[in-house]
Image (cartoon, grey):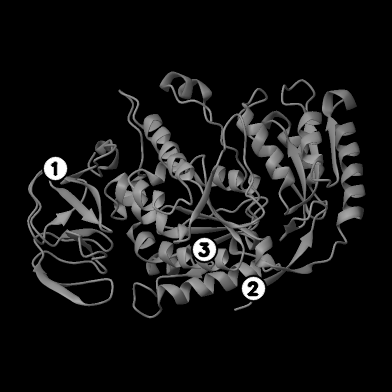
Amino acid sequence: MITTFRGYERPDGSVGVRNHIVVMAVADCVEPVARIIADGVEGAVAISQYHGCIAGEMVANTLIGVGKNPNVAAVLLVGMGCESMAVDSLGNAIRESRKPTDWISIQELGGTSNAVTEGKRILRAMLEKVGGLKREEFGVSKLVVGVKCGASDTTSGLAANPAVGATADMLVDAGGAVLMSEPEEAIGAEEPLAKRAISEEVRKRIYRMIGDEEKRCSVPGVQTELLCRGNVEGGLTTIEEKSLGAIYKSGSRPIKGVLENSNRLLERVPKEGGFYLQDGTHLEPMTMSSMAAAGAQIIVFITGRGGTFGHAIVPLIKVTGNSDTYLRMKDDMDINASTIIEGQESVEAVGRRIFSEIIEVASGKRTRGEVLGYDNFSVFQRDPRLDALLGISQS
Amino acid sequence: MIDAKDNVATALTSIQSGDMVMVVSSSQKKVCEIKITRAVPFGHKLAIAAIRKGDKVIKYGEPIGHASRDIGPGDYVHIDNVNSNRIQLPKAWYSKEP
């Protein structure tokens, strides 16, 4: 099994699997300008967030983390000029990673055409610096891989998630890091997760993260949708069943920590590798951004009923354990794991196939989502008012 | 079935009412044969033992909820006869009926 990949070394020692130049609109009001600036510039991708210009700290933490992500070679922040989440404070935080980072304010520059001219000038200068970077060989210990499932059915818990779990164990054993979020989809699966905690402190943090999420989902008089209609049509009956199937993708290695993702702090995955949980949400595009902000360069996405999206920064490898879904949505799927249910391949064998795919994608192979041009980007912001009312302290 | 403690199994193909099905363990060993009382779609669950109202429904060796009414062997097991032990779904949202 090949355990090295060819990636781009960054000034902070991290290694990217892509070489994006990010044009970051700090609020959705400037997104169109960011898109015009990025348009036509090789390697440039525009991203934004949709919580407005007085968004909470979680949004700022995520944008900073995404800017620092190793798949990002350089960052141009675009602000209107009046927002509280100012381009210079975000930009200075991203600069800690020592990658080329700059920012513009549209009001200061005098409107769209000046901002576009100046933005494109900055991007061209950035492209000259980072566009010619060559891939070099690195070990799996430089990889952080997120695992996420969505549009699940019962094949996810039976086949695709166990296969990804086998991959997760292979990555950890080779010195890499694996990250799983979605605290809501751990309700009912606390015990099997807590058993894997490396310390009493981590065990307590697992229970607290899931317990806090259960409180948010159990507000009297409010019905919370814990399973989508597709989950139920796919045979999933309760949140416990969904959770117990979902955690299979985390593999079996010790859980080294629960990474904080709150208004106070977004913790990054430590350099030493291993398996980590991350606090946050279970909703796919937002979780992918949280994982990217924690340092994930690749995400493996497991789906029963199918999914047609990607992420602007992090390539997404899509795996399905449902043969019908694979056949109907072949264009969107990277890995067919339905061979497990059909008895043609073992969980381990499919796990090895997914591992090889991760290595290839890390070295530049484009995922189905990348070929289709998918560049989803959204950011999770937990409402601090709800937590305050429920007595949940921001850790 | 996935774990020896389970009282439900997952249909690996769509099953019709009245069909006899063989239940196998995750290591492909025969556990029992059972007559299906109501059609079970692919990926959905069937009871492999009687589960009385209030008793735990077990899959993956862990409780996934409790029976909201008596369930017989071979019965289709889903949101109509199982409730969560943790957070109940707003079931009307999932109904296909108008």
Please name the amino acid that badge 1 sits on: Ser
Q: Residue furthest bottom?
A: A344
Q: CA distance from mark 3 to mark 2?
A: 13 Å
Pointer 3 and pointer 2 on the same chain: yes
At mark 1, the secondary structure is loop
Judge whether residue A50 can be spotted in this image: no
Residue B8 lies left or right of residue A39; in this view the side is: left
Q: Residue furthest front?
A: A200
At mark 3, the secondary structure is helix
User: Who's the residue at 86% across and 33% down the image?
Assistant: A115
Q: CA distance from mark 1 to mark 2?
A: 50 Å
User: Who's the residue at 80% across and 35% down the image?
Assistant: A91
**Disc 1 marks which residue?**
B68
- Give how far across and how far down residue A29 sits, in percent: 70, 29
Please name the amino acid that badge 2 sits on: Thr
Q: CA distance from mark 1 to mark 3?
A: 37 Å
Judge whether residue A202 can be spotted in this image: yes
- Give how far across and how far down residue B7 sits, in percent: 16, 59
Residue A137 lies left or right of residue A229; in this view the side is: right
Give the label, 1 or 3, closer to the camera.
Answer: 3
Subunit of mark 2? A
Label 1: how many Cα within 10 Å (few below 14, some 14–19, many 20+): some
Residue A370 lies left or right of residue A168; in this view the side is: right
Label 3: how many Cα within 10 Å (few below 14, some 14–19, many 20+): many
**Disc 2 marks which residue?**
A3
Which badge, 3 or 2, is on the more N-terminal residue? 2
Label 2: how many Cα within 10 Å (few below 14, some 14–19, many 20+): some
Q: Quadrant of residue A222?
A: top left
User: Who's the residue at 52% across and 39% down the image?
Assistant: A280
Nearest the eye: B48 or A126: B48
**Disc 3 marks which residue?**
A168
Please name the amino acid that badge 3 sits on: Ala
